Image (spheres, rainbow, N blue to C red):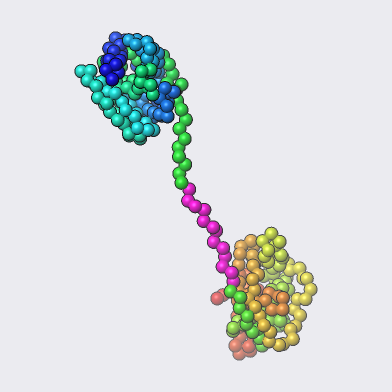
Amino acid sequence: MKKRVLTVILAVLLLAAVPMAAAANIPSLDIAVPEVSGVVMKLTEVMPNYSYGPFFFNPSQMSYYIFFGVEGTISFNKDVELVIVDENYQQTNVTVEAGNVVKISEISGGSLYFDDASKGFICFVCENDSLRFSSYSSADLDINQLAVAVETPAEPQPEPQPEPQPAEPEIEYVQAVPSPQKVLVNGEEVAFDAYNIKGNNYFKLRDLAMALSGSEKTFEIGWNDATRAIDITPGLPYTAVGGELVPGDGQPVQAVTSTAVVYINGEKADLAAYNIRGNNYFKLRDLGAALDFGVSYDAETNTVLIDTTTGYTP
């Protein structure tokens, strides 16, 4: 240890003999040297040049001199021990814990010895240390040569959550009774195969499209293989497929909740529907609201009125 102290004292005396030169600082730099294994040093406000070579008073030792501005700091990726020699050449050993940031102005002249201490050391010097900083003018090596890339630990990512699945529709079997009500479309009677389910009238979608074809509220019906859904496009003429507006047998039938998905102009529509004998029947008022045609009821004549010249009124 006495040899270490003597080495540092001689280094200080050597530094004092050389004039100082001004230099720009590097705001932040991570460096490492092969003689100190596993240690990465994070430097701030470090001078761009450093010196490295045989120690003048003991050529068997190699020495690094790294210079800092007055606001310079250093931290290490692991615990290290620095040897500090004050202006009275008194030695203090200081342990710097990993991650702790130390001001160079508080440890100027401090040294970190190589893994094999007899081989040399790294000396850290602050710009306002008039005794030690004067040798910066002889530093002629680019500090960036010692730079190392430090990987920033990736921020923990939240565990991916499964996308919520749409709830399976509740399957319900109900009795559908043929609707006893007469239906007028723009004042003209049309015979629909319509059913009353729980007090509401349900119409076959293609029957309604046929009845409204050519009116202001005409719409086309198609099947989208990609979405496995029924596509309704308002404003387009309806293309008949056969079987539209065929009268029913007038008998009650069993209806089951329909799982059909419907899009209107590309937007998913929330429509109550039942499947009867393989065909989808939709609540008339839901269709009126979705396609904006008038739906009303004349209690005196027990007549459902569909008006394509007006919009839907709840």
Residue 99 horizontal/vertical position (percent): 35, 35
Q: Is residue 53 above or below residue 313?
A: above
Q: Is residue 48 above or below residue 314?
A: above
Quarter of the picture holding the C terminus: bottom right
Residue projecting furthest to the bottom: 300
Q: Is residue 178 above or below residue 45?
A: below
Left or right, 178 with reference to 139: right
Residue at point 64% right, 71% down? 259
Main SS class of the magenta portion in the image: loop
Over which residues does the magenta segment extend?
A: 157-169
Q: Is residue 162 magenta?
A: yes
Q: Residue 180, how many percent across, how many down?
A: 66, 88
Say if residue 152 shows up in the picture.
yes
The residue located at (44%, 18%) in the rendering is 142
Say which of 249 and 29 sits in front: 29
Residue 134 screen position, x and y as percent: 30, 14
Residue 124 visible in the current orientation = no
Is 213 on the left-hand or right-hand side of 94? right
Residue furthest toward the right? 242
Q: The N terminus lies in which quarter of the figure?
A: top left
Q: Nearer the viewer, residue 125 or 4?
A: 4
Residue 117 covered by magenta stretch: no
